[in-house]
Image (cartoon, helix red, strand yellow):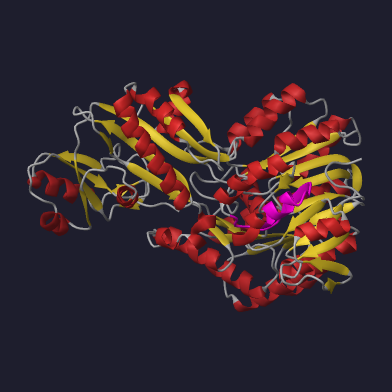
Amino acid sequence: MSILINKDTKLIVQGITGRDGGFHTMKMKEYGTSIVAGVSPGKGGREIDGIPIFNTVEQAVKETAANASVIFVPAPFAADAILEASCAGVGLVVTITEGVPVLDIIKVSPVAKRNGTKLIGPNCPGLITPGESLIGILPGNIFKKGNIGLISRSGTLTYEVVNMLTKNGLGQTTCVGIGGDPVAGLYFLELLEMFENDPDTDAVVLIGEIGGDAEEQAAKFIKEKMTKPVVAFIAGQTAPTGKRMGHAGAIISSGSGTAEEKIKALYQANVPVAKEPLEIPGLLKKKLGL
Amino acid sequence: MKIHEYQARNLFRKYGIPVPDAVVCHSVEEVEKNVPDDGKLKVVKAQVHAGGRGKAGGVKLARTKAEVVENARQILGMDIKGLTVEKVMVADAVNIEKEFYVGLVNDRNSKSVTLMASAEGGVEIEEVAKVSPEKIIKLAIDPLLGLMDFQARAVALQLFGEIMQALAAAAIIKKLYKLYIDTDASLAEINPLVLTPEKEVWAIDGKMNFDDNALFRQPEILKMREVSANEQKEIDANEKGLSYIKLDGNIGCMVNGAGLAMTTMDMIKLYGGEPANFLDIGGSSNPKKVIEAMEILLSDKNVTAVMINIFGGITRCDDVARGLIAALGQIKTEIPIVVRLSGTNAKEGLELLKSTGLPTVNTMREAAQKAIELSKKSKV
């Protein structure tokens, strides 16, 4: 088992004819993801590497029974692409695009909710269930099937951590990059709950960073609702106040959203917080009694 | 993106929110020439992108024109939180019976624009939030319906307690919401919103921030952008596809990915050093990007050692190594550089880097330790 995606996930790529969309479509396909369609308005009827292209998501879903979509379209058009997929009944929409206006995501969110669509991102690396399905831009080669769930606000930092997990024999059920924007789709709470309910996940790694109070909420949830161990890492302890640290959501505003507050909340929920990424495998093994 | 108070007030006025008359001046001469000598009580306010101007002495009342000039003389050129005051706004002062706070902000948790209001106006709202959060009214606005009239009325009535005043305030709140949505703001505050003894409602001080992601569709807002020297450096870097923030330490770092870049800074600190910057070069192995990143890094004269921290994912480490070799061949510097490569094809990458003679390591911990060690030597 896993969460959100598995070998039965049938994926549409929106923006498949763009540079990034095209490149990562090939990478995902190489990994073994079942890509059933691409969508690119005006290019319907063509094929790219055996993948049929449609003009609309609705047509693509009708023809292929796709149940997930990944979005590579440029930021000004990303919200429309998300809505198109959601309104066509796609259950999971993963937005890789960076720089999407926050008010666009705020508008899209209630529509997705009404349609029963789960959103991930924007500005995220995607997610992977190792050995089954990869959606997004994650480097598939560093992941390995196993029993650890991972949720992260970051991209490269996630790869760094996963690489260490894999090298230490700690494979993963599903790893989800939730993205670096202030307003985003699925977040810590929803995903922690999914991992808690996934019989194959035995422990969860949570990678947070400065900005907002999602880690504090996660800590509360872990304390009250979770039976499985969680190990955390928080980036940005040395970040100055009032500066966006690359990610739009990684900002300490007027003294709130600091790493210290988050680490404190996690400790209080009995979640060990690694001082550096290198400590994560050891902390996990200790929690799992390995 | 931040704007000045006077710019926020101009937007308020455009949207029909009542603000007292004001003049913006860049020099004492302009103050002498442009501020009317009308005998009205005036307030002289520093225009900088920083909070706490009042505490810093950047806001002063003046009874006469001579006092206005004298206050402006003191405030212009003043340093507030590291920023030099280059402009003052001289506004008509308003008699205040009561002060309120009204603000709109993008709220992460409710995924909505949230209206915040408080009868504790004129003080920093963050302080109110910490000390007595129950004094802040919060309302998540449905993005599809917008702020409804009855909601604005209800919130305003809670603040003012009297319906005629509440209706005036509700109209202002509605206008503020329209302005917020129209301009892709990320924060809009009226603090204070005041009730005068004549029972009029005025917006006295305004603050607005805007969503950087939406600036592409907000040309009028973008025109208002004013940046300090440090911010200009950050914007220049951004235009090159780099994300750079200067810090106060001496160990420069160059990293692929924002989360990893923050972690790199933390690691330098953890092992006893001080990071000089945040620098995310993104996912490319393009030598040009590395050269540009190095130029920005080394333009900071505090830097005494550099730590390059790359995790290869889709981007392969051997490609990154080739990029680094090409870049380092063009950059002449005495400053020691440590390179850490890990991930996809790290072994090949490290092998290639041997030709440069640069110290190379496998882990972030080693890289941080080595960079700190080298920075100490290079200081001597």
- Horizontal side of A191 relative to B65 (left or right) equals right
In this view of the protein, can residue B293 be seen by the observer?
Answer: yes
Q: Nearer the viewer, residue B269 or B344?
A: B344
Work out which quarter of the rendered image holds the C terminus of chain B and state it: bottom right
Residue appearing at x 82%, y 72% in the figure: A45
Residue appearing at x 84%, y 72% in the figure: A48
Q: Nearer the viewer, residue A203 or B90?
A: B90
> Which span is picked out in magenta?
A81-100
B337 in magenta:
no
Residue appearing at x 43%, y 46% in the figure: B178
In the picture shown, does residue B325 fall above or below A270? Answer: below
In this view of the protein, can residue A274 be seen by the observer?
Answer: no
Residue appearing at x 92%, y 50% in the figure: A7
Q: Position of residue B217 (x, y in %)?
A: 50, 61
Q: Nearer the viewer, residue A65 or A140?
A: A65
Q: Position of residue B261 (x, y in %)?
A: 64, 53
Q: Count of labels shown?
A: 0
Residue A142: which quarter of the image?
A: bottom right
In the picture shown, does residue B346 fall above or below B54? Answer: below
Q: Position of residue B185 (x, y in %)?
A: 46, 49
- Horizontal side of B195 relative to B249 (left or right) equals left
Q: Nearer the viewer, residue B215 or A65?
A: A65
